[in-house]
Image (cartoon, rainbow, N blue to C red):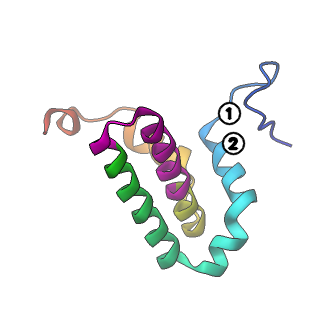
Amino acid sequence: MIPLDINNSKKRPMTIRDFQELIRRAYYDRDSRRGLFKTWLWLQEEVGELAKAIRKGDRENIEEEIADVIAWTVSVANLLGIDVERALLKKYSNPPMKHFDEE
């Protein structure tokens, strides 16, 4: 069993893979019934809520909405069978500088 209690300092820190498993256990059945497209629409709604929070400058709400966007993104990845940690490491472990030079 993966320790997922992030408030217990005696356990190791949560990894991206741990978080993905946490989201899978909590939401995969519901997301599967909803389907990929509708789950993706929920993600888009959360992105909109993040945009509103950023426009208002509400730091606490921004943090909450960023967490929601990440969780819904992971839900979409789960439905597609994508290992998020692996995808991030593949893309960003040695990122080309062009990604950071563009505005």
- Tell me the element at label 1: loop
Amino acid carrying mark 2 in the image = Asp
**Does residue 63 sit above or below 7 in this rendering?**
below
**Does residue 78 sit above or below 11 in this rendering?**
below
Amino acid carrying mark 1 in the image = Met
Q: Is residue 2 magenta?
A: no
The stretch of residues the image draws in magenta is: 54-73
State which quadrant residue 55 falls in: top left
Disc marking residue 14? 1
**Distance between the Cα atoms at labels 1 and 2?**
6 Å
Which residue is at a point 71% across and 49% down the rendered structure image?
22
Which residue is at a point 35% across and 58% down the rendered structure image?
48
**Does residue 28 sit above or below 66 in this rendering?**
below
- The residue identified by callout 2 is 18
Report crowding for label 1: few under 14, some 14 to 19, many 20 or more residues within 10 A (C-alpha). some
**x then y, percent, for residue 52:** 33, 51
Which residue is at a point 63% across and 71% down the rendered structure image?
31
* Quadrant holding the C terminus: top left
Which residue is at a point 52% across and 64% down the rendered structure image?
76
Residue 71 lies left or right of residue 25; in this view the side is left
Q: Is residue 71 magenta?
A: yes
**x then y, percent, for residue 26:** 73, 58
For the stretch drawn in magenta, the main secondary structure is helix
**x then y, percent, for residue 9:** 77, 19
- Tell me the element at label 2: helix
